[in-house]
Image: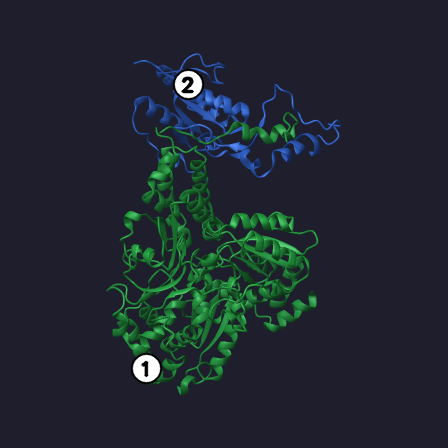
Amino acid sequence: MEKLVVATASLAGCFGCHMSLLDIDERILDLVEIVDFHKSPINDIKEFTRDCDIGLIEGGCCLDENVHVLKEFRKHCRILVSLGECAIMGGLPAMRNGISVRECLEEAYLNGPSVRNANQAKILPNDEELPVLLNRVYPCHEVVKMDYFLPGCPPDADLIWNALTAILENREMHLPYELFKFD
Amino acid sequence: MEESISSILEGHHHDPTRLMDILIDVQDETGFIGDQAVAQIADGVGLSVADVEQTRSFYHFFSKKPTGKYAIYLNTSVNACMMGHDAVARTFEVEAGIPCNSVTRDGLIGLFDTSCIGMSDQEPAAIINGKIFPNLTPFRVKELIRDIREGKSVDELVVEGYGDGQNSNSDIRAVVNNNIRKIGPVLNPNYKPGEVIRKKLPEMTPQQVIDEMKRSNIRGRGGAGFPTGMKWEICRQAESDEKYIICNADEGEPGTFKDRVILTERPKLLLEGMVVAAYATGAQKGILYIRHEYKYLKTYLEKLIEGAHKRNLMGRDIAGIKGFDFDVRIQFGAGSYVCGEESALIESAEGKRGEPRDKPPFPVEKGYLDKPTVVNNVETFCSAVKVLLYGAEWYRSFGTTDSTGTKVLSISGDCRYPGIYEVEWGFSVNDICGMAGAEDVMAVQVGGPSGSLVSPSDFDRVLCYADLSTGGSLIIFNHSRDLLQDVVLNFTSFFIEESCGSCSTCRIMPVILRDKLIKILNARGVKQDITDMLSWAEVLKASRCGLGQTAANPIITSIHNFRHLYDQKTRGEARYDTGFDLNKATQEAMMATGKFVMSE
């Protein structure tokens, strides 16, 4: 059987979901028997050089760069999975959604207690190299089509393991209630 | 201001259950209800500031900030928009020099949007300081603003003749027209007020009255169609020291205005019906709950109630029947569609936010002030009087087997003769279009936004409880209308505006559905969006009241009956489009950081 190819990305997330992916522990050895990892922060492959079967996306989109990365993933991955609360709902970063971008920037660079006197020139960073904030944090499915959603903050390692093996074996996923109840 | 609020509180005996009246009076007298007023009222009636604040903030016609010496509320309903609302609204804005929902700097003119005000047959219409100004045109708006600036009083602003019938009564003096086009047995003017109370009631026991109601098979006219006799009987059997009769005259369903006409032309019939219900159930107190938009009828109706007392048709030992006491008070709403739901109406009459209650218990067991309460529609009470007057057999000779009697319809939209029609149940949509002089009809909205948008292929369907049930609102659209943009979007926005916010389903899902609809209207939609709307709308059925449960009806019924309109606007192949626009999403940050300057 040909190995399936998996790519992962962390957009506006905290890498907690990637940590959870690593929490499948020694089963990662079983995993690499059946999948190859392509573009991913885990192996530091930065560009797509081939099409992949599965893309795991952690985090929503808060910057234009996130949107570009997500669209790249959509282009190169047959199946795209929202991994965790931030990818599905925007999560913690989306707490800024009720506040205007200007207010956020001013708080961060002009008025916040830690910067109040440090930024005398009152500059809001605007170098061309810097990615641009979106007007709000978007969950992934509001930007591109997502095929599956794995809830959790982070999703349990077993949940990720179950999902990956289900896709690999082309069967329905086993989703016991305990895996996605959060309190 | 403090003094006038004190005297208002005094006038209502510092009664917390009369908070609505207190707030209405304060709003009328001072033009707004600020935090200071809220604190004073809370202190005066012995409620917490939060309790007063939540009632104040719930209703559209209560304002935290001054609404201007002349507060203009312009209707935004479908009918208004069809008859030229946009041009009128723009003229108001230009002439007053302010955008809608704001007040001029000198505090003279306030301009506000409002949901349907019950003038669908004479739109566009506005309410200025409680007075109705129908049939507005841009020219008329210029006159109005000019006259306001010249310092004329609201009464002096009226230059048109008064409307037909009682609208010219010295206690009403409204420019409003009744437009009664077809009279049936209930609206029939050959009726002597008080006859049933004086001649029929003394000969009948309350149970006999109920039995007659049951034999007539009369059902509630508000739309839900609960058997009236059964409702009265349950209330009669409920044990309690106090019972209430409430008349629901809070018709807020866009396109409905029949209650306004009945309140103007047949109020004595209505009041007599309430007395009959009181006799049957053993209630001693009644409340006539009228929507705020009809406040111009206040003096007129109060005098009629006074007159009924004088003639012993209300008060003590009515019509000489020992121990039969009954009195009615008028309760005005303050601008809220959901208060048309009976339990929300009761909450509102108790001075609280108009949020529907959990059921059971139903109002007949635990209603106003937790006492057994009958809530009936205006038309139901009127019909009940005729049932007693001419008998159940007579009444059953009208209509169909499951829907006996007649229905008063409010017909508006694209037709030659908009107005009030009393017809027997069993009329088809086609009949109605013919009657109203409607041509080139593309669709008819039966039962208002919460009803269904019916296409010509279904025009042979009939009005009755088993097929097309309706509270009486029919809006006709001809082929010049863009149904999705002009009708469905307007209705969906109406539900969003009027949701009480209690159930998350009704608070959130209509917004999601509207966004999907806008996406389709902006040509970004795909087939998936249509199927999403249909399946997601199911969620709304979990809402507590009819408003939430039917909030998706404009979208669902238009998808079912006018699918081609959606298909035209969505792209052929089933591709996915989230509607995300990166340029728009980054614009704000680009401007904030100076990377991008908006060109003029």
Within 10 Å of disc 1 (Cα), the crowding (few <14, some 14-19, many 20+) is few
**Looking at the image, which is closer to me, A29 or A147?**
A147
Q: Which chain is green?
A: B
- Is residue B429 visible from the viewing direction of this image? yes
Q: Is B345 in front, or is B293?
A: B293
Residue A1 vertical position relative to residue A82 in the rendered view, above or below: above
Q: Which mark is residue A76?
A: 2
Instruction: Tell me residue B381's x, y (percent).
Output: 38, 71
Is the residue B179 above or below the residue A24 in the image? Answer: below
State which quarter of the image contains the N terminus of chain B.
Answer: bottom right
Residue A7 location (% of width, % of height): 43, 19
Tag on residue B205? 1
| Image quadrant assignment for residue B248 | bottom left
- The Cα–Cα distance between marks 2 and 1, rounded to whole angstroms, is 82 Å
Q: How dense is the environment of label 2, judged by Cα within 10 Å: few (below 14), some, or many (20 and up)?
A: some
Nearer-the-camera pick, B231 or B238:
B231
On screen, A126 above or below B430? Answer: above
